[in-house]
Amino acid sequence: MRTPAIVVAVDGTDPSRAAARWAAREAELTNQPLRLTHVMDWDWAAGRNDFGGQHFETARRFAENIAARAAHDAKTAAPDIDVDTNVAIGDAAAQLIIGSEEASLLVLGNRGHGGFAGLHLGSVSQRVAMHAKCPIVVVRGRTDPTQGPVAVGVDDAGSADEVLEAAFTAARARGTSLAVIRSFLPAVPPYWGHLPPAQVHIPEQDIPERARVTAQVAPWREKFPDVPVEILMSHDSAAALLVGVSHGAQLVVVGSRGHGVIAGTVLGSTGLQLLHHADCPVLIVRPHGNRDSRR
């Protein structure tokens, strides 16, 4: 088995080249190898299954050129990292999901070939994000942000510690601070009518909620004493809040599953909205135990 690497999907588009550069810098920060994967969507009918024929050879050379160009982008961004390339054959999303089994991190651009201009997230990226077997990053918005904090959305899910660990680790690697975001809906007294929860200020609920988040973060502050931490509370939706914060952040980190997620997918609604609308790269943390259970 090969050493786990950061794997980045490349297809020659500008978003995938941005993803390759981001992944290269991440490999440099974390001292990991980088693998650039291009999936060749071979037309079986047109090729008549002839893997030795001229048409296949031309398509293979084209695919290798895409991977080589991405490798050049990666080495330009981070000259000292170890880089290799891989050309797979088949459905892009399916091959990337299979490849995620052995990856430490899978990095995607937000768009690929054949998408509609009005959509914010390509179909392949969305399918992979929904079903990948390792943490993923979708590089979107400001693709090379170097200023501002890492932002993390936390709730009371069982995977919260893994999300916090990933966020603290990312903040330390970048030498920046961490903004811990907690969104919750207060219980609105009936006599307040239909006032939206976001407009409600009930200190007797806000204070204990902040105390719970502070306690949740405390062990990680002890493990990462060099990472400054700010806790931000809000009654707005988590997705709206994190999208707003993304305009000034280097990276947004969230868990892969929220409350009430359909079994068989690994992405909740907050993560999906971030992948469509965030203004910086988004890291979706997948619980370690889920990878083992899906093998």
Image: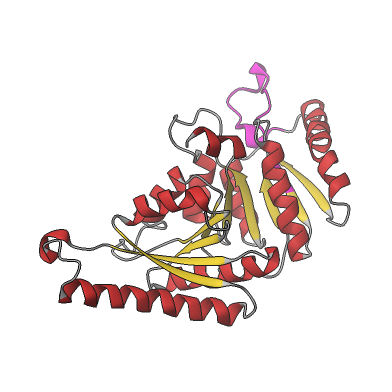
The answer to whether residue 28 is above or below residue 108 is below
Residue 217 figure quarter:
top right
Residue at image x 11%, y 62%?
48
Where is residue 269? Give x, y as percent: 49, 40
Query: 142 or 202, which lies in front?
Result: 142
Specify whether residue 263 is in view.
Answer: yes
Residue 190 colored magenta? Answer: yes
The answer to whether residue 261 is above or below residue 94 is above
Query: 136 or 233, which lies in front?
Result: 136
Number of numbered tags placed on the structure image: 0
Query: 44 or 267, which lies in front?
Result: 44
Residue positioned most to the front: 1
In-image side of 84 versus 237 (left or right): left
Residue 190 figure quarter:
top right
Residue positioned most to the top: 190
In-image side of 277 versus 227 (left or right): left
Where is residue 233? Give x, y as percent: 74, 41
Where is residue 62? Give x, y as percent: 30, 77
Where is residue 153? Give x, y as percent: 66, 44
Specify whether residue 234 is in view.
Answer: no
Residue at image x 72%, y 38%?
161
Residue at image x 82%, y 28%?
208
Query: 45 or 14, which lies in front?
Result: 45
Q: How is the image coloured?
A: secondary structure
Residue at image x 73%, y 60%?
149
Residue 50 colored magenta? Answer: no
Write down the region rendered in magenta.
180-200
In-image side of 146 versus 82 (left or right): right
